[in-house]
Amino acid sequence: MKDAKTRLRRTMMFVPGNSPKMINSADIYGADSLMFDIEDSIAITEKDTARLLVANALKTLKFHSETVVRINHPTQTPFGMDDLKVILPAKPNLIRLPKVEDISEVELVAAEIEKVEKENGWAEGTINIIGAIESVKGLYNVREICKHPRMAAIALGAEDFIANLKTQRTKYGIELYYARSQILMAARDAEIQCMDTVFSDVKDMEGFAAEVTRSKDMGFDGKSVIHPKQIVEVHRIYTPTDIQITKALKVLDAYKDSIENHKGVLAVDGKMIDGPIVVRAQRIVDQAKAAGVNVEEKREQA
Ligand SMILES: CC(=O)SCCNC(=O)CCNC(=O)[C@H](O)C(C)(C)COP(=O)(O)OP(=O)(O)OC[C@H]1O[C@@H](n2cnc3c(N)ncnc32)[C@H](O)[C@@H]1OP(=O)(O)O
Ligand SMILES: O=C([O-])CC(=O)C(=O)O
Ligand SMILES: [Mg+2]
């Protein structure tokens, strides 16, 4: 479970669960997580087919990416509990609980997971939950929701959220600023991850890059995406630059030296280094390593 709360999740790509073609090729695009959808991209008449297709894919295909299944809501729709019955035995890494509004909904899904883990002799925490806040009511309960032990991450579902807010999405996202901030604070307080919502215009790569940069700067761990070409852009934005990495290494090396040699206040390139700077430097190095950067090579180049 520890890994579920910390693993690299820069991108989580939605894959419609009724498309064998997209399901079969999804793993080649290098998303950190793949989210097979049986909720809003699937028509009511296709729910049974999508559920079975996704379960079958999970059982028979090998995935490098983390696997996530977005179920239908377990109490607000007649499909959610059946989704769990079919999907859980196929052992996805995470269940995406959409439109979550209350801790009781997380408890309901968690109880089903626990049952299936026990039946199969799997370790506790084999399957975890990512919730999606998609309404004001959900936002008001987000702190309690994030603290459930099965929760690995929380996400914003902006399309539904703005419908509930009775507004529209703007270029700068002012209408989502409060929700994004609140969800982030709740995630950090609960020590789980936080994913930003989809950007639906796949043609507008400039607008997409601007939104990803803003949400990364706010503190989000990653972005939900709907098309393979969005993956490359998010990974580029989320991977620290060479300059950031070498600077961070310098800070960490100086800090290590000051601890080992009992030195007092230290400075790097004329700038005083204190606790929070060391923490941020460590995060940059961790992010670079997680993204596959050879950090030792950068140290040699520094
Ligand atoms: C508000 C919400 O709930 S959002 C979440 C629900 N929405 C979704 O799940 C939508 C996911 N995305 C998609 O279905 C598609 O990207 C669409 C419909 C938007 C566009 O699809 P296409 O017109 O096929 O896009 P395009 O032709 O550019 O695709 C290029 C390739 O990427 C593949 N691809 C595109 N999107 C995806 C995806 N999400 N997952 C896997 N493969 C994909 C296509 O199959 C195609 O493969 P090919 O080159 O082997 O033929
Ligand atoms: O969770 C997401 O990003 C997609 C979604 O369902 C929404 O925006 O309503
Ligand atoms: Mg939604």
Image (cartoon, grey):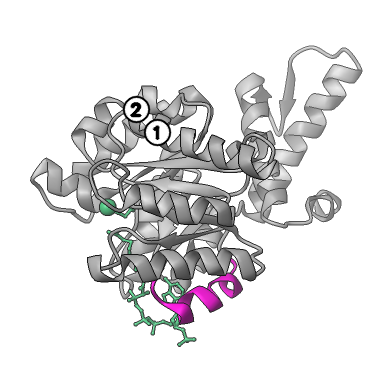
**Which residue is pictured at 37% across the width and 23% down the height?**
143
Badge 1: residue crowd in 10 Å (few <14, some 14–19, many ≥20): few
**Which residue is pictured at 79% across the width and 12% down the height?**
264
Residue placed most toward the observer, 165 or 145: 145
- Vertical position of residue 239 compared to residue 22: above or below: above
- Vertical position of residue 242 compared to residue 16: above or below: above
**Which residue is pictured at 22% across the width and 56% down the height?**
171
**Which residue is pictured at 49% across the width and 55% down the height?**
87
- Vertical position of residue 113 compared to residue 223: above or below: above
What amino acid type is highlighted by mark number 1? Leu
x and y percent of residue 40 in the render? Answer: 27, 60
In reply to whether residue 23 is colored magenta, the answer given is yes
Q: How many marks?
A: 2
x and y percent of residue 176 in the render? Answer: 24, 42
Q: Which mark is residue 204?
A: none
Q: Is residue 92 visible?
A: no
**Can you identify the residue that label 1 sits on?**
108
What amino acid type is highlighted by mark number 2? Ser
Assign a secondary structure to mark 2.
helix
Residue 64 shown left or right of residue 71 in the figure = right
Badge 2: residue crowd in 10 Å (few <14, some 14–19, many ≥20): few
Give the main secondary structure, helix, strand or loop, of the magenta stretch.
Answer: helix
**Can you identify the residue that label 2 sits on?**
104
Q: Which residues are magenta?
A: 18-30
Marks 1 & 2, CB-CB < 8 Å contact: yes
